[in-house]
Image (cartoon, rainbow, N blue to C red):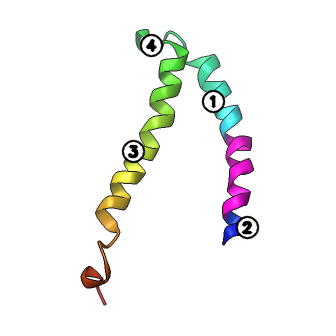
Amino acid sequence: MTGWFMTSIPAAGIVGGPVSGWIMGAMGGVARLRNWQWLFLLEGIPPIVIGLLTLATVADGPATHDG
């Protein structure tokens, strides 16, 4: 499990670098936002959504576990 976690760090750079480059190159001036503002929004929304989903689905402790 630790190996998979450690492998995800360079994989995030391999995937995230080109995505960030595309956002910086293509989104500047759209809806009167600058490219760095689009980068901030588009890369910040998914972690917030996943965090809220995790908060809603993960059990609070052993006493609230179903099963």
Upstream in the sequence, badge 3 or badge 4? 4
Residue 27, x across and y down, in percent: 55, 18
Q: Which residue is mark 3?
A: 48
- Which SS type dominates the magenta stretch? helix
Residue at the image position 59 percent from the left and 25 percent from the top: 23
Residue at the image position 70 percent from the left and 34 percent from the top: 17
Q: Residues within 10 Å of mark 2 (few under 14, many from 20)?
A: few
Residue 49, x across and y down, in percent: 38, 47
Gap in Å between the C-alphas at discs 1 and 3? 18 Å
Q: Quadrant of the C terminus?
A: bottom left
Gap in Å between the C-alphas at discs 2 and 3? 26 Å
Gap in Å between the C-alphas at discs 3 and 4? 21 Å
Q: Is residue 66 above or below residue 58?
A: below
Residue 51, x across and y down, in percent: 39, 52
Q: Which residue is mark 4?
A: 33
Residue 13, x across and y down, in percent: 71, 42
In the rendered structure, find residue 20 and report the number of the disc placed on it: 1
> Which three-letter amino acid code belongs to the residue tagged 3?
Ile
User: Which label sits in the foreground, 2 or 1?
Assistant: 2
Q: Residues within 10 Å of mark 4 (few under 14, many from 20)?
A: few
Range covered by the magenta-colored residues: 5-15
Upstream in the sequence, badge 1 or badge 4? 1
Gap in Å between the C-alphas at discs 4 and 2? 39 Å
Q: Name which quarter of the figure residue 55 lies in.
A: bottom left
Kindly indicate whether the residue at mark 3 contacts the one at mark 2 (C-beta within 8 angstroms): no
Q: Secondary structure at mark 3?
A: helix
